Amino acid sequence: MRDPRITASNGEVAHSSLKGEVEAERYTDGRWMMVQQPIVNVSQEPRGPRVSQLLFGERFLVLETRDGFSFGQAERDGQVGWVLSGALTGPEEATHWVVAPATHLYPKPDLKAPPDVALFFGSMVRVTGERPEYLRIHTGHFIPRQHLMPIKARFADPVGVADLFLGTPYLWGGSSRWGLDCSGLVQTALVACGVDCPRDSDQQEALGDEIAPDEAFQRGDLVFWGGHVGFMAGPDMLLHANAHHMAVAYEPLKEAADRIEANGGGPITARKHITLG
């Protein structure tokens, strides 16, 4: 049975590749669009609950537009849902991505120039020009050079990436410095290290190799509960976005596990080692 979270169909419209596999009134190849605002919610239905978020420069395959919302599928992880149509524009070929937790878009290459808006870690841009300390992007704005890396560059330590978000407020479905949930933090860190990673924790539990119960954790290993996931920063220390702290926080694994089980979240369900590409 197909996972509806990553199946490009809503019963009325479906992607052409699914013809004969899922029922729909019509099928389409869709049209690739790009997010043109700092962040946009992906929801289960127009004005419905948030299931994820997309960042500036990310691509979204639009299959249907209705009442100001577009239904489609995110390129990053195959997540299906609805986004505000006004948040989308024609795609640009990205050359760089934002590697700071957040960065400002300056109207000119001057740190005293009032910035127009901020972009978040993982946002993608096309660089069109250079200054000594800034790069000019396709919107005409300038970003500090040290906040961007070439589009194919990757980090080598997912815990180090996750640590950039320490103190970020907890937000269900969140995917940025503005707010993160547990699986959003894991996805952001792993994707930054070149690992294809799905959106939700139950999907992420299929990643990597199982760690034996008597085997010591390594930095970067994942620990799962029913509906929750976090990184091991060391043999005994967990780094996770969680509703107890309402933030991304470090916490001794035993304390977190005891609390989660006492609150009805059950015991640890999986321990996984992730091999970076």
Image (spheres, rainbow, N blue to C red):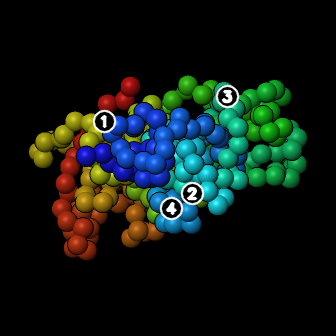
Q: Earlier in the sequence, mark 3 or mark 4?
A: 4
Q: Is residue 182 left or right of residue 33?
A: left
Q: CA distance from mark 3 to mark 4?
A: 29 Å
Disc 4: which residue: 45
Labelled disc at residue 274: 1
| Mark 3 surroundings: few (<14), some (14-19) or many (≥20) residues within 10 A | few
What amino acid is labelled 1 in the image? Ile
Q: Quadrant of residue 135?
A: top right
Residue drawn where x is 62% and y is 26% of the image: 150
Q: CA distance from mark 1 to mark 3?
A: 30 Å
Element under label 4? loop
Q: Earlier in the sequence, mark 2 or mark 3?
A: 2
Element under label 3? loop
Q: CA distance from mark 2 to mark 3?
A: 22 Å
Report the mark closest to the observer, 1 or 3.
3
Give how far across and how far down residue 203 sits, in percent. 31, 47
Disc 2: which residue: 41
Say if residue 160 shows up in the picture.
Answer: no
Q: Are marks 4 and 1 in contact (CB under 8 Å)?
A: no
